[in-house]
Image (tube, grey):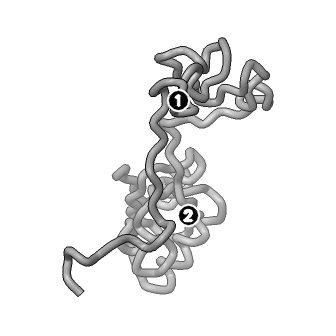
Amino acid sequence: MKLHNLKPAAGSTHSRRRIGRGPGSGLGGTSTRGHKGAKSRSGYKRKIGFEGGQMPLQRRVPKFGFKNINHKEFFPVNLSTLQALAEEKGLTKIGAAELKEAGLFNGKKLFKILGNGELKVALTVEANAFSKSAEEAIKAAGGNTTLI
């Protein structure tokens, strides 16, 4: 077998239709476009979603909801979790690294300290956000809060 012997498989190729080359070709006249209307004219481009004048699907379906592009999603961490972590490992400072090490946080999202639970130990807490109740509880226990 040589390169000059190669041919495509039988029936796999077709000669292209030569439209608009006179009446003898059988594809002259309107050149398969039919009579009149936008589709018969040169320069016609169908608009995306156009359904031939019928009300398009994207206009028939009701719209609802709103997605805020500036929305930040926080991973929640409660004070009770901080208290348990501080007692278990004897920590005085808790941040993203300590939470990740404990397996409570994957380190990819932002995290927020929430005021659910009770804090008995004075802790220095670093987080992306604090709820008001959590911040008050940490300061009442003699600790500090730091925003990352």
Q: CA distance from mark 2 to mark 1?
A: 80 Å
N-terminal of the pair, mark 2 or mark 1, is 1
Residue at x-position 59% and y-position 18%? 40
**Residue located at (61% from left, 15% from top):** 38
Quarter of the picture holding the N terminus:
bottom left
Disc 2 target residue: 77
Please determine whether, in this image, residue 112 is positioned above or below residue 100.
Answer: above
Tag in front: 2 or 1: 1
Furthest residue to the front?
Answer: 24
Q: Position of residue 93 (x, y in %)?
A: 36, 69
Q: Amino acid at mark 1?
A: Gly
Q: Is residue 5 above or below residue 38?
A: below
The answer to whether marks 2 and 1 mark residues whose Cβ atoms lie closer than 8 Å is no
Towards the viewer: 116 or 38: 38
The residue singled out by tag 1 in the image is 24
Which numbered marker is on residue 34? none
